[in-house]
């Protein structure tokens, strides 16, 4: 027996609903990750142990000085980077037309790869903290420099710049698409330049400037929730 036409139509229309519900859930989870990532990064930077200079001696010494602060900062940064990387994957969905599509897509992928790699590198804080506490400082520094000088290490640590380029591409792509204003790109570039000139001993100033580099993710998260409310 052939089903009535109106019954078949109603059944067909009802089929996409579970998939659409799952899509909304993923978009909201991604939006939450986009907002949580920068907040965790800010908290991680604000709890970084103060460091007198960018030398390896002062770096290892700062990590070994207060193990609680070192571990708290490291875990906040770790999960902040992971949340930002996961959230970045939904950002291209904010672009509706052709304008800004490719820069946003490249930015999302580059930022995700870079942030995930750096999240693993945060483990360095733990072992540098331990060698700084358990060994003479000259031995701890020698171990630290030897690890950093390993042949394949640049293939890991070098992806940090990929994350920053990805975040810049996200800013430009979203601005080109009209999702955000160009002010976001200006803020990002200003924070990036500031990081080159702010003395490292100004811990909280450095932390604030560094956290601004993740502002594009937070703004994208807010836009995601605004878009979800508008289409609900």
Image: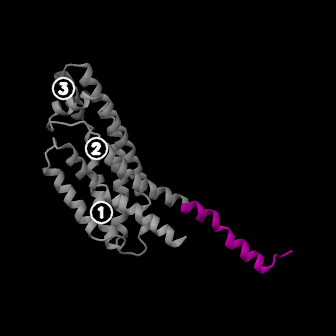
Q: Which residues fall within the magenta stretch?
A: 1-24
**Residue 6 in picture, x, y percent from top left:** 76, 79
Q: Which mark is residue 142?
A: 3
Residue extending furthest toward the bottom: 5
- Look at the numbered disc 3 and give the secondary structure of its residue: helix
User: In this orientation, which residue lies closer to the viewer: 5 or 218?
Assistant: 218
Quarter of the picture containing the N terminus is: bottom right
Q: Which mark is residue 46?
A: 2
User: In this orientation, which residue lies closer to the viewer: 96 or 227?
Assistant: 227
Tag 1 and tag 2, C-beta contact below 8 Å: no
Q: Residue at 19% x, 19% y: name it.
A: 136
In the image: residue 138, left or right of residue 48: left
Going from the N terminus, do you reach mark 3 or mark 2 first?
2
- Look at the numbered disc 1 and give the secondary structure of its residue: helix
Against 225, residue 159 (above or below) is: above
User: In this orientation, which residue lies closer to the viewer: 175 or 181?
Assistant: 181
Q: Nearer the viewer, mark 1 or mark 2?
A: 2
Please identify the dominant SS of the magenta region.
helix
Whether the magenta-drawn stretch holds residue 27 is answered as no
**Residue 55 in picture, x, y percent from top left:** 14, 35
Find disc 1 in the rendering and name its residue: 169
Q: Residue at 40% x, 55% y: name it.
A: 35
Measure the C-alpha gap from mark 1 to mark 3. 38 Å
């Amino acid at each position: 027996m052939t089903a009535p036409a109106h019954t078949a139509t109603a059944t067909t229309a009802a089929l996409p609903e579970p998939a659409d519900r799952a899509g909304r859930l993923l978009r909201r989870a991604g939006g939450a990750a986009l907002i949580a990532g920068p907040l965790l990064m800010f908290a991680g930077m604000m709890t970084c142990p103060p460091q007198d200079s960018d030398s390896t001696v002062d770096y290892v010494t700062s990590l070994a000085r207060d193990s609680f602060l070192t571990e708290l900062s490291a875990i906040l940064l770790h999960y902040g980077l992971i949340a930002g990387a996961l959230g970045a994957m939904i950002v291209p969905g904010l672009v509706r037309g052709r304008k800004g599509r490719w820069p946003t897509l490249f930015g999302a992928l580059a930022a995700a790869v870079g942030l995930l790699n750096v999240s693993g590198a945060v483990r360095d804080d733990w072992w540098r903290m331990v060698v700084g506490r358990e060994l003479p400082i000259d031995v701890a520094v020698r171990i630290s420099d030897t690890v950093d000088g390993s042949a394949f290490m640049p293939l890991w640590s070098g992806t940090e710049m990929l994350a920053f380029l990805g975040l810049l591409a996200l800013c430009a792509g979203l601005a080109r698409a009209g999702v955000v204003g160009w002010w976001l790109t200006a803020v990002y570039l200003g924070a990036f330049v500031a990081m080159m000139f702010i003395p490292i001993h100004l811990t909280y100033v450095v932390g604030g400037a560094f956290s601004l580099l993740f502002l594009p993710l937070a703004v994208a998260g807010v836009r995601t929730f605004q878009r979800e409310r508008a289409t609900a």
